[in-house]
Amino acid sequence: MRANVSKYELVTPASLADALKLCAGGHKPFAGGTDLMVLFESGKLPPGRYVSLWGLSELRGITADDAHITLGALTTYSDVRVNAVIAKEHPNLCAAAKETGALAIQNRGTLGGNIANASPAADSPPALLVAGAEIELRSLAGTRWVAYDGFHTGYKQTLMQAGELITRVRIPRASDRVSYYRKVGTRKAQAISKVCVAASAKVKAGVLSDLRIALGSVGPVPLRCKHTEAVLVTRVIDAQAIKEARDAVQKDIAPIDDIRSTREYRLTVAQNLVAELALRFVAS
């Protein structure tokens, strides 16, 4: 059942400062709308006051300095896909953007909105975790940067406080790394992931170092697989290492049965993907 339009208010602020005032007063942020409009059409979006962020130039743009690549919260998946610096240094994030919905969704969906929506099945969070992303949160009380690893505190829960907006995301500059991204869904396109994995590492003489593996759709939040990472670094990747890594995956994730898949399937696929990425990395 579609929602009753008269029960909603959507305000368009002239500036970020105005948007922050509205959020402090209880308005809820509305960015690209690719998630909220689905809820609205199905009658599941809570009635109330919303503030449209779409026209705020302060939340747009991708810049790079010697230390970081910084993306405005309204950066769309299409913006990410065509950015040459991100494609070279963080191809996982570009791959995630290409896997997100159809072109219309990529043109409208935003990085900040994807993070704030806090779905464990979202496509970009594993890539952001692997990249070592940080999130800028701003409110009338001030601005703070928080590590993305730990930003999600539970299913659909984050570190964000009342009145805060995600305004920017920054990721460290990267070089001399190999990357891996894979999304497994019911279809090859326009499907919510059953399992999603991103990984990157440095490789020398077939040995992995600074390995980062992140998974989505296998727990209440997107997560780093730190037990699995520890098993695979600084050693020869042979059959024993792969076996130990597959066992370690069970310590890192907590998949469930739901409408899209089963716990057993998700666990098996996650283990297979970890084995695949490890072997691919040492062969690169």
Image: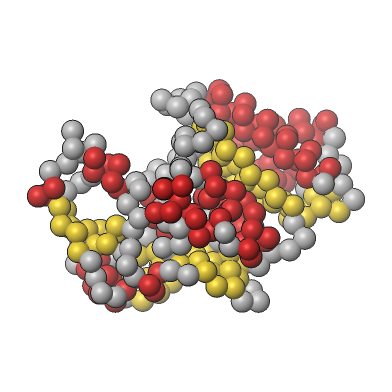
Assign the N terminus to one quadrant of the image. top left
Q: Residue furthest right?
A: 205
Give the left or right position of residue 36, taking residue 256 as reference.
left
Looking at the image, the residue that sits furthest to the left is: 6
Q: In which image quadrant can residue 177 be found?
A: bottom right
Q: Position of residue 170 (x, y in %)?
A: 54, 66
Vertical side of 38 occupied by 75: above or below: below
| 273 sits left or right of 155 in the view | right
Q: Residue at x 46, y 43 (%)?
A: 102
* Relative height, residue 113 to residue 144 (above, below): above
Q: Does 155 sit above or below residue 31?
A: above
Residue at 67% in and 61% down: 89
| Residue 228 position within the rendered picture, expressed as x and y whole percent measured from the top left | 68, 41
168 or 262, which lies in front? 168
Quarter of the figure with residue 52: bottom left
Query: What residue is at 37 percent from the left and 60 percent from the top?
Result: 160
For the question of whether residue 41 can be seen, the reply is yes
Outermost front residue: 103
Q: Nearer the viewer, residue 56 or 199?
A: 56
The residue shown at (64%, 65%) is: 85
Is residue 234 visible to the viewer in this orientation of the structure?
Answer: no
Q: Percent x, y for residue 167?
A: 41, 68
**Where in the figure is residue 232, as x and y percent of width and height?**
76, 43
